[in-house]
Image (cartoon, rainbow, N blue to C red):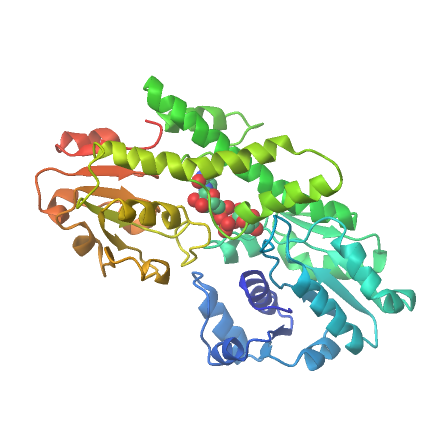
Amino acid sequence: MIGTGYVGLVSGVCFSDLGNTVYCVDKDKKKINLLNSGKVPIYEPGLEEILKKNFKQKRLIFTTDLKSAVTSSDIIFICVGTPTKKKGNSADLKYVFQVANEIKKYIKKYKIVITKSTVPITTGDKIEKVLLNLKRKKLVDIVSNPEFLREGEAIRDFIYPDRVVIGTDSNKANKILKSLYLPIIKKTSRYFNTSRRGAELIKYASNAFLATKISYINELANLCEKTEVDIKDVSFGMGLDQRIGDRFLRAGPAYGGSCFPKDTRAIVDTANNFKTNLSIVKSVIKSNDQRKLLLTKRVEKLLKGKIKNKNITFLGVTFKPNTDDMREASSLYMIPQLHKKGAKIKYFDPSGLKKDFSSLKNVKFCKDISSACLKSDLIIIHTEWNEFKLINFKKVVKKNKFIIYDMRNIYTPSKITNSGIKYFGIGR
Ligand code: UDX
């Protein structure tokens, strides 16, 4: 595994747990030292235990030595980052090509080189050009095997994926990869062999579709708010239709994370390069951006426009629960905006303090729910961590009048309003 970021580390650890010897390579010495001391640099439930077990059994090797890792391996997964370029919307592939150029020197016998990072359609073709000499000598096959892991659920997603997609027209590579994935695909999931370009596109198409589903339900939630319909009922009723499915129909703040925002931008960019207008995905990106503004305005409205010196509590600031990841979290927009308007903000997140807010004078991290909620005027449930689901608000706020804005609809409105608390949700 080249790159010990989210995808590389989780996949590496899980592959070793299936009995393979896995070399996890990274240029970052600090990270490798940390991993060699049995610590995990990312927050992912369950990962540390599996890592330690396989590390002890010497099936998992963390190293900065790319040469020895490549020469010792039959299969090479490229798992480096593909962030959005600083200028424009396309995915920055410089790390992917750096890896391709480096490994080229060390391949002396047949190996499969796989992109697991999310890469735009035709990236495999470009890697093949870099490795053309080796390809001609039949020393490599370049394959696309996109990863569909969700943060916070990564181990389960790896062991029980809905599908394993392998993009290659090489029978040899396909056979080897099928046997690598056999322990996983035995358990109900599907193994799908398609073209390399097809596999590359499946990944982007899937993420853009899921983002579309979320934006769709979020816009419907706006309509529900005006028509006194509960969006949860709408999601449930829609989801009963198996053609639609009930997952990813939870209305909430703008979607965030390391994938949806980046991948929707990148697929539009790729399509533009091929002179194809993905107007639906373009609208989704716009709708999601506007949602951050819309919900911030709603917060102001709940406080009747009087933000200055109001005590606002954020419960959860990450883009989703069970992760410490702040990438493109909507709190990154909301908190500075409300702070600018004079609000005094306290926040608690089970994954700890966030340096993103450290320069904001009146934004304070609290070590628990009670201290974050004490004397608050407005409590915003921004991320649906489990520990926020059964709070006795009156007890922790210690104040008569306060408002709850449940952006994840984790509470039943009547239960809260019956206890005399003002409650607002999303689309209800
Ligand atoms: C996503 C894809 O699900 C995964 O397959 C891919 O490999 C990487 O990108 P991830 O970013 O970890 O995974 O999180 P996900 O659970 O998909 O949530 C993304 C965002 O959508 C979060 O902000 C989440 O809160 C939001 N979301 C999700 C909703 O608002 N409503 C939903 O119904 C589902």
Q: Nearer the viewer, residue 10 or 15?
A: 10
In the image, is residue 283 above or below residue 274? Answer: above
Q: Quadrant of residue 103?
A: bottom right
Query: Which residue is rendered at x = 59% and y = 35% of the image?
Result: 282
Can you say which quadrant of the picture contains the C terminus? top left
In the image, is residue 271 above or below residue 355? Answer: above
Q: Quadrant of residue 337?
A: top left
The answer to whether any part of residue 174 appears in the image is no
Rendered location of residue 292, percent (x, y): 40, 39
Q: In the drawing, does residue 75 fall left or right of residue 243?
A: right
Rendered location of residue 382, percent (x, y): 33, 45
In the image, is residue 157 above or below residue 231? Answer: below
Can you say which quadrant of the picture contains the N terminus? bottom right
Rendered location of residue 135, percent (x, y): 87, 65
The answer to whether any part of residue 294 appears in the image is yes
Rendered location of residue 206, percent (x, y): 61, 41
